[in-house]
Amino acid sequence: MITTVTTTTTTTTVVAAHFATIAGVVAVVALIIFLVMKELLSSTEADGVVSTENSGLAGKARLLADRANIAIFPLLFVFIAIVLTKVLEILG
């Protein structure tokens, strides 16, 4: 079987690989940002003690910290997939 590689095919492959790399970097940076945000928001209550003047704010912060998991879990799966792909690329 004869395969013809043209400049269009090569360009398309390079652009797709470049896009995948950029998407992976964006996903990892977003994961880091969400993890930092969750940690900062969950630390608003020190040892379960909430001040009376900021009780509404602490409740909202805790709610946002809990809801951050909605974005963290899919990004974590993407991160694991990237790591596994890179490890298998090195081993294979």
Image (cartoon, rainbow, N blue to C red):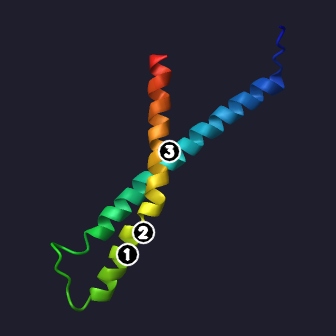
- Residue 33 falls in image quadrant: bottom left
Are there few (<14), some (14-19), or many (20+) residues within 10 Å of tag 2? few
x%, y% of residue 52? Answer: 21, 91
- Residue 43 falls in image quadrant: bottom left
Placement of 55 over or under 27, stated as above or below? below
x%, y% of residue 91? Answer: 44, 18
Residue 29 appears anywhere in the view: no
The residue under the point 53% across, 48% down is 26
Three-letter code for the amino acid on which mark 3 is drawn: Val
Q: Which mark is residue 78?
A: 3
The residue under the point 69% across, 29% down is 14
> Mark 2 highlights which residue?
67
Residues at marks 3 and 1, CA–CA distance in whole angstroms: 24 Å
Dot placed on the residue nearer the N-terminal end, 3 or 1: 1
Residues at marks 3 and 2, CA–CA distance in whole angstroms: 19 Å
Q: Which mark is residue 63?
A: 1
Secondary structure under badge 2? helix
Residue 14 appears anywhere in the view: yes
Secondary structure under badge 1? helix
Placement of 73 over or under 57, stated as above or below? above
- Residue 49 falls in image quadrant: bottom left
In the displayed image of the protein, which residue is found farthest to the top?
1
Are there few (<14), some (14-19), or many (20+) residues within 10 Å of tag 3? some
